[in-house]
Image (cartoon, rainbow, N blue to C red):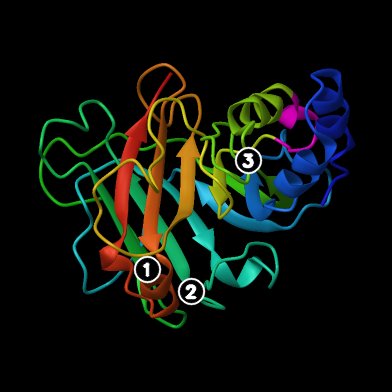
Amino acid sequence: MRSMDPFRKEARSRDLPEDEVERWLGTVRPCAKLGTAGEAPPGSPVAGRLGGLPPMPKDEPVPRLPFLASVDLAAIPPGATDLPLPKDGTLLFFASTEDPWSGRAWSRLVYVPVGTPVSERGPDGEYPPRVLPTQDLHLMIEPSLPNRGYETEEFPHAGDLGEVWWETCDEMQADGSVQVGGYPWVWNADPTTDYDHGPGDWVLLAEIGGEDLTEGDLGIVDWVIRRDDLAARRFDQARACFDMS
């Protein structure tokens, strides 16, 4: 991962206690950023795809939702995140963010185990969802910190530390349409803590956003899941949340 010195420099300029800054940096989580060829350094391995038709299992109907992205879990090396991800298989992410608060089913996550017969196809019926342009996604391993902080006894300046990450993250983290693991980017509500998902250790599985992918101003879709459900491959227990600035 990259040097966190830009964070330290900005925190120092705000006179934040150095011991607290170092404790905050101790909470860094690695994440897998997946970006297009224009976002990732040359030679970055392909680990997924934006858009196109989803490679769905042949015996499963295709969701009537826009297909956003796929992630090849075999291309994400151990240690790229702190999540108990499967060693292989593919994640398929679907979402329609025109009105995610309507109460209708607006998102779907499909896990395709390795070796499953698949075919690239759209849903049956009239008026299919739009098909987004196809682009390969290239892997980058980056640091992640919260951009919003909540004051605690251990971190009395958490709000300021979150602002420091907001101010400096572009110097330490590449852009990418898909993020696997790490902390979510929070505009209004943290999808791991500010929703009533039920008890458990809820973690960010994936965050997807970008121009032409989601509606709204800087809209993002976060898929969260309990850590033990992820380890057991219970992907049907994941929850999707939408946020925008």
Q: Residue 4, percent across and down?
A: 84, 41
Between 3 and 152, the one lying in front of the other is: 152
Residue 89 position within the rendered picture, expressed as x and y whole percent measured from the top left: 48, 74
Q: Earlier in the sequence, mark 2 or mark 1?
A: 2
How much space separates mark 2 and mark 1, taking CA atoms?
7 Å
Q: Quadrant of the C terminus?
A: top left
Q: CA distance from mark 3 to mark 1?
A: 37 Å
Q: Nearer the viewer, mark 2 or mark 3?
A: 3
Q: Is 210 left, or right, of 60 in this rendering?
A: right
**Is residue 98 shown above or below 94?**
above
Q: Which residue is mark 3?
A: 155
Identify which amino acid the numbered label 2 is placed on. Answer: Gly
Marked residue nearer the N-terminal end (2 or 3):
2
- Give the amino acid type for the residue marked by disc 1 in the picture: Tyr
Label 1, residues with CA under 10 Å away: few <14, some 14-19, many ≥20: some
The answer to whether the residues at label 2 and label 1 have Cβ atoms under 8 Å apart is yes
Residue at 71% over, 21% down: 167
Mark 3 is on which residue type? Phe
